[in-house]
Image (cartoon, helix red, strand yellow):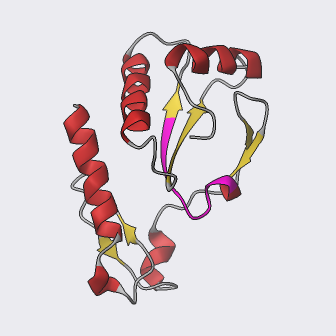
Amino acid sequence: MKNAIVIKLALFLIGCKDSNMSTANSPYYTDPTFTPEWLIPNSSELKHLHKIFDFELVNQDGEKVTNKTFDDHIYIVYFSFNICPGIYSNMTANMGIIQEEFIDNQDILLLSHSVTPERDSVSILKAYAEKKGVLSGK
């Protein structure tokens, strides 16, 4: 599993450095095969791709985090149920593997969204982050 995650991320990073695509902005991945699609900036095709809207959240340290926090970075997003013992525990462990793999790479950041913010106060998120070895700033 760890190798599959690393291979997919490596393919993504290699795809981003394709020197033959100098007229394109960034690759887009629209299917599970991780086949990069290079689109010209402002092309009509871009209008049909998913966009992440501006957001403002509070992290486990009580600090404001916005989409601007991730400007000029690759970020891996995970949506979590911090109180669920099922698959989310495994997914959190996988995020830990990714964190360790890219610990020294400042271009890659991790972002976990709680899908139960009404239950996950800053103090609960902080305790969860400490228990799972989450590094602030990464």
**Residue 80, position as x, y percentages in the image:** 52, 27
Front position in the image: 45 or 84: 84
Question: Dividing the image into 4 quarters, which one contains the C terminus?
Answer: top right
Q: Quadrant of residue 29?
A: bottom left
Q: Is residue 106 left or right of residue 16?
A: right
Q: Is residue 128 left or right of residue 41?
A: right
- Does residue 60 lie above or below 138 as drawn? above
Q: Which residues are magenta?
A: 69-78
Front position in the image: 119 or 106: 106
Q: Work out whether residue 56 can be spotted.
A: no
Q: Quadrant of residue 124?
A: top right
Magenta span contains residue 51: no
Magenta span contains residue 72: yes
Residue at horizontal 44 percent and vertical 9 percent from the top? 85
Residue at horizontal 31 percent and vertical 72 percent from the top? 37
**Furthest-front residue in view?**
104
Question: Dividing the image into 4 quarters, which one contains the N terminus?
Answer: top left
**Residue 40, position as x, y percentages in the image:** 42, 85
Q: Is residue 129 left or right of residue 37?
A: right
Residue at horizontal 27 percent and vertical 43 percent from the top? 6
**Residue 118, position as x, y percentages in the image:** 73, 21
Q: Work out whether residue 87 can be spotted.
A: yes
Front position in the image: 37 or 66: 66
Residue at horizontal 57 percent and vertical 31 percent from the top? 135
- Does residue 85 lie above or below 106 as drawn? above
